[in-house]
Structures are given as structure tokens and as C-alpha cells.
Image (cartoon, rainbow, N blue to C red):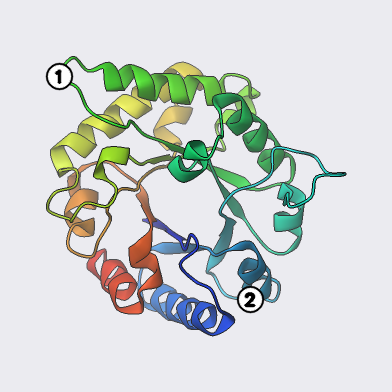
Amino acid sequence: MLIVANWKAYVEDGAKAKKLFATSKKLKSTHRSDIVLAPPGPLLGMLAMNNKSSVAFAAQDVSSTTGGAKTGEVLASVYANVGATYSIVGHSERRAMGDTNTTITEKLSHALAHGLIPILCIGEHTRDSEGKYLSFIREELTTALEPLAPKDRTKIIIAYEPLWAIGKTATAAIVPADLAEMVSYIRKVLGELLSGKASARSLVLYGGSVEPENAFLLAKDSGINGFLVGHASVDVSAFSALIKNLG
């Protein structure tokens, strides 16, 4: 399992960041899951610059620009230079703030150009009985990946985060059977965008009310390769329980 801990803007001080990092290193040393931390930018630099552990780091987002007079923008190259290995791109919260499909493709290109492994977030707002949400997923994947070179498409990790499931309790979120169907559909679409058997090797994560109570069941038979974890990732007890439940 690849576990990406998206700290969002929950962590505001270095002391808590160091505690979460220490917990993650301890968990990684005794459990099989690979752990990636996505702190706010300045905290990422503080933790990752001298990181000698097997815990990796991800940017929560990267700029769609290449530099210059762009106050407030943080380039993919900056994150790569301070120790990030991955970058989240197209998170639903960034899309809500204005990221378009075009912007997301630009961010994917910049991340790839600087050696970052993009984690592309996709997911429908609602579900309908006619299955129109499947077309929405197809469009998000197609518009993001088609402009990329075929070899670059194979480097993208997909994080499926249905917006309707975010913020719900573990029991009210997606059930394993429905998640398995979505993972199968995502791989089908990837099969149309990637050559050969590359789609079978692509990593597909799930994000959407991931808790210690539902992580094991969601992982067991759904075909996912890991999780994109939100608020549970900044609670030491919850995050520890989640990793331990995965074995």
C-alpha cells in the first residue's frame, strides 16, 4: 500500500510537523506500507531537506507557471530541490479554487519535467442512476493525460476521490464493491490512454473519508494500491491505527 498523507492546512507549526514525521518513520520501520507526507510548503522544506529515512514527501500542489514575476507561486523545481518526490495535482479543493483541466495538464507537465511523480486526483461530485458520472471520470482522465507524451502518462499515479464521499463517516462513505467497480473502470480508461499492459501497472489510490475503521476493508478486495488520506493523517492516533490496520 502507498499511503499519501495530505496534511492540507491542518498543521501550522514545526513541532507538530516533526511529531507527525517521527510517527511516520516509526510506522514505516515496522509496517509494509510506503508512506508519503504532503505538508504545507515551508514545513515540507524543513522536514525533507535532510531526510535520510524511507518516508517520502509530496507537494500539495505545484504552480502552472515556469517562473518569473509570479508572486506567491511555488514552482515544481522548488519542491524537487527541497526534497519532494511526488506532487498532488488536481485535488478537488484546488479545482474548486479555479484549476481547470488545462491548468491541471500544465501542472502535470511541470511536475514531470522536474522529476516529481504526479498524483492526479479525479472524482465525481455526485452519482446518478444513468451512470453519467462515469463520463465525468473519463473526461477528467482523458483531458489530463492525452496532451502528455505516452511515456509520461505511465508515470502518473491516479487518486480517485469522489466528492460526495468526502467528509462522511467511514460507514457512510463508499463501500468496497462500488470502489472495486470504479477502480476497474479507471483501469479500463487508462488502458485506452496507455500502451500495452502499462495500465495494469499504474497505481490507483483512493481518497474520500479514509479512516482506520474502513481502510482495511476498502483495500482488501477493491484493487486499489493505496490511499490519499486527509484529516486522519494529522491525528497521530488515527494515522497510526490506519497504517497498523493495513498490516
Secondary structure under tag 1 reads: loop
Q: Residue at x 44, y 75 (%)?
A: 24
Which numbered tag is attached to residue 177?
Answer: none
The percent coordinates of residue 221 (x first, y second) are 18, 44
The percent coordinates of residue 96 (x first, y second) are 47, 38
Q: Nearer the viewer, residue 97 or 149?
A: 97
In the image as oriented, which residue stretches furthest toward the right? 68
The amino acid at mark 1 is Ser
Q: Residue at x 17, y 63 (%)?
A: 213
Secondary structure under tag 2 reads: loop
Residue 42 placement: quadrant: bottom right
For the C terminus, the quadrant is bottom left
- The residue labelled by disc 1 is 129
The percent coordinates of residue 61 (x first, y second) are 59, 49
Q: Earlier in the sequence, mark 2 or mark 1?
A: 2
The percent coordinates of residue 245 (x first, y second) are 23, 67
Q: Is residue 75 left or right of residue 41?
A: right
Q: Is residue 114 left or right of residue 44?
A: right
Q: Residue at x 79, y 50 (%)?
A: 71
Number of disc labels: 2
Instruction: Tell me: residue 204, above or below residue 129.
Output: below
Residue 96 in sight here: yes
Instruction: Tell me: residue 68, above or below residue 211.
Output: above
Q: Residue at x 21, y 50 (%)?
A: 218
Q: Nearer the viewer, residue 29 or 102?
A: 102
Q: Is residue 234 left or right of residue 173?
A: right
- The residue labelled by disc 2 is 52
2 or 1: mark nearer the eye: 1
The amino acid at mark 2 is Lys
Q: Is residue 146 left or right of residue 24?
A: right
Around disc 1, counting alpha carbons within 10 Å, would you say few (fewer than 14), some (14 to 19), or many (20 or more)? few
What is the CA distance from the residue labelled 2 to the residue labelled 1? 49 Å
